[in-house]
Image: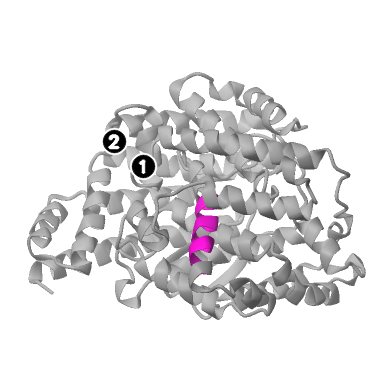
Amino acid sequence: MSDSVSKLKSQLYDADAIGAALAIMAWDQQTYMPSGSAGARGEHMALLHKMYHELMTSDEHGKALEEAAKTAEGEDAALVRVAKRDYEIATKLPTELVGRKTLLAAKGHEVWVEARKTNNFSLFEPILTEMFDIAREEAELFGYKDHIYDALLDNYEEGATHADAKAMFDELKGPQSRLVKQISELPETDDSFLYGTFSEAKQSELTHRIISDIGFDLNRGRQDTAPHPFCTGWSITDVRLTTRYKDYLMSSVMGSMHEAGHGMYEQGSPLKWDRLPLSGGVSLGIHESQSRFWENVVGRSKGFWSVYLPELKSAFPQIGNVSIDQFYKALNKVKPSLIRVEADELTYNLHVMIRFELESDLLTGAIRVRDLPEAWNAKYSEYLGITPPDDSTGCLQDVHWSGGMIGYFPTYSMGNLLSYQFWAALKKDIPEAEELIGKGQFKEIHGWLKDKIYSKGKEFTPKELVMKVTGKSISAKDYLEGITKKYAELYELEPALR
């Protein structure tokens, strides 16, 4: 390793320490921090964000990148590429704007929690208005060619554009809507046995067992509760998951598997990259593919529950003597619903599409923030045939906008597509993958993902990684084929309707 690369890494380690402190504060804010502490927490985080931003945009750091680029080879060259992209993005934003957004996000989270709790959108409206104003400022500073959305989406999914996202949703909308319509005309699946009051302690015990079985290392991570499930971390050796417990039993189970998919991706980077920009997921779309892989491809499969249904019955005898076929169909029940994170696999993309369209309109000024509840309800009525009874189950349900994560939502649907695309590639190498799931044996599947995806960190761009793993660019083909086959069989649809 050259001296110039060593100097660059030293700077990156310093920046990572500040970033880790920020991540710990953010995690604590959503898990254990008293609600009255938001003011001080916001000031602390704003100051640290300014320090981080100043370090990452300094002339010294820019020179270190230039020098390292002259001699870096292999992994070091990839490190320089990733760090340079981070530098170029950061230098476009004034430190004042970074601090202002951080302070607003800290305040915004607490206001969002209270607004959702009390069904009071007017409480959140000023925060959200200011956050979208900041998003427009950022977009103009980043620059874009075709659509203001491009500048924001690229931060989460390198190279992706508004046109890409729109084309994706246009491709999904027809086939998915037809399947949902066909199923909605059939008698409703009974899943009432999955609703009730269930011991949180037993749910915690079961979810910890499951995430450990599929490969999440609890010696290098932990799971807590939060209003909105998420995964975060500040080292390959310290990854945090959260879940939540509701009157729907599978909320905690599927939420835990989803977040564990994120967590295993973070834990799977080579230890030598720890605290450097090369570690962790390369993009949010690919990150989401891993959470959806474990939640949907594995966790909603009949084989998986042939193993874990007896444990579920033992822990929660009130669900009764349900058969594996009844449980499998109930778990995969298709019914338009209000809450995105609890939507069935088939209607989920429609929830994401609504948010994408609303974000686009809010950014361009086609609608105003104060009109969001009405616009939200109109789209739910149009795309899902249901209307939220209040804003808490409508436009206040997601945490992302309170923190300024605007331009983020399309990556969820990208993740859905890629989860099936990676599954198709995995089955070529491991033809018995479904049988392994049915035996509760996940080591080989986890190992394939770690070898092909987790261990690559950010060594390759998202598009390069997808091509290396699957041999083709991101496509809806495997996803549409997979869900059509699954739900046509599950609901015994006539071949002509598929």
Q: Which residue is mark 2?
A: 142
Q: Name the amino acid type tagged 1.
A: Asp
Q: Which residue is mark 1?
A: 154
Tell us which disc is closer to us: 2 or 1. Answer: 1
Q: Is residue 101 visible?
A: yes
Q: Residue 27, image x and y in percent? A: 51, 59
Which one is in front, 459 or 232? Answer: 459
149 magenta-colored: no
Q: Is residue 227 shown left or right of residue 389?
A: left
The residue shown at (85%, 55%) is 191
The range drawn in magenta is 415-426
Q: Residue 330, image x and y in percent? A: 81, 56
Q: Is residue 164 shown left or right of residue 437?
A: left
The residue shown at (75%, 30%) is 387
Which one is in front, 312 or 483? Answer: 483
Identify the secondary structure beneath mark 2: helix
First in residue order: circle 2 vs circle 1: 2
